[in-house]
Image (cartoon, rainbow, N blue to C red):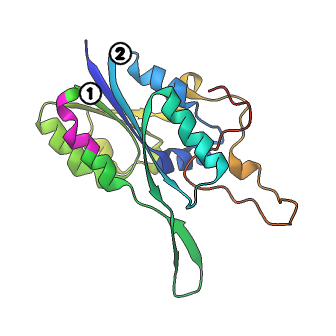
Amino acid sequence: MERIALFIDGANVYSAAKRLGWNFDHRKILEHFAAGGTLYNAFYYTAVPMPIDDKQKRFTDALTYMGYTVRTRPLRESTDEHGDTSRRANLDVEIVTDLLTTESRYDTAVLLTGDGDFERPVEVLRARGKRVIVASIAEMTSYELRNAADEYVDFKDIREYVERPGYRLPSEQRGHDRQGAEHRPFYVSAPLSEGDER
């Protein structure tokens, strides 16, 4: 039985969902990509605000209960020369570390990202006899990464298997709280709502 490991770049997948206009059901993602064998592990990488807010905490907790190993890094604020503030965190090192240090435990790595920075680690895994599947959307996938992988899966082609119907992205729910402060979604992933049963 083929051993499968799943590696999800949360920020990249969330950006893809915003472009597609529909959201992902992370339990369905697990089931879809593990259907062809035995799932060794599923890693989910995401940035979180510090201190972490309740919505993001519920989201990461839900992922853990689904069976994901969740890797987080705090969002860092930076201001450019024009005074514009941005919040970001890079989890590429964590993803590459898990890809390479756990390789003896899987036959196939499924990498959900389009980030070209992963081209070389993918080539290394293939040279070591591993099969690598990359999943994303065409407009967000670097040519180099797509070329390095054994197989490329476009999210548009598997929508029926991985979509969370009827769930709007946080960017579509933007509003204001009682104090008039704007709710701004984090780029990392969609938070869970109360009563969520994923």
Residue matched to label 1: 108
Which of the marked residues, 2 or 1, is nearer the chain's N terminus?
2
> What residue is at 59 percent from the left and 41 percent from the top?
59
Q: Nearer the viewer, residue 185 or 149?
A: 185
Q: Amino acid at mark 2?
A: Gly
Q: Farthest residue to the right: give it.
A: 178
- The residue that appears at 74% across and 49% down in the rendered structure is 172
Q: For numbered disc 2, what is the local secondary structure? A: loop
For the record, the magenta segment spans: 98-104
Judge from the rendering whether residue 135 lies leftward or rightward of residue 80; answer left or right: left
In the rendered image, the residue lying farthest to the left is 128
Give the quadrant of the N terminus. top left
**What residue is disc 2 on?**
36
Residue at the spot x=28%, y=43% of the render? 98
> Where residue 84 appears, x then y in whole percent?
59, 80
Residue 86 percent location from the top left of the image: 56, 71
Q: Is residue 100 above or below residue 105?
A: below
Identify which amino acid the numbered label 1 is placed on. Answer: Thr
Q: Is residue 81 above or below residue 36?
A: below
Q: Element type at marker 1?
A: strand
Residue at the farthest bottom position: 81
Residue 193 is drawn in which quadrant? top right
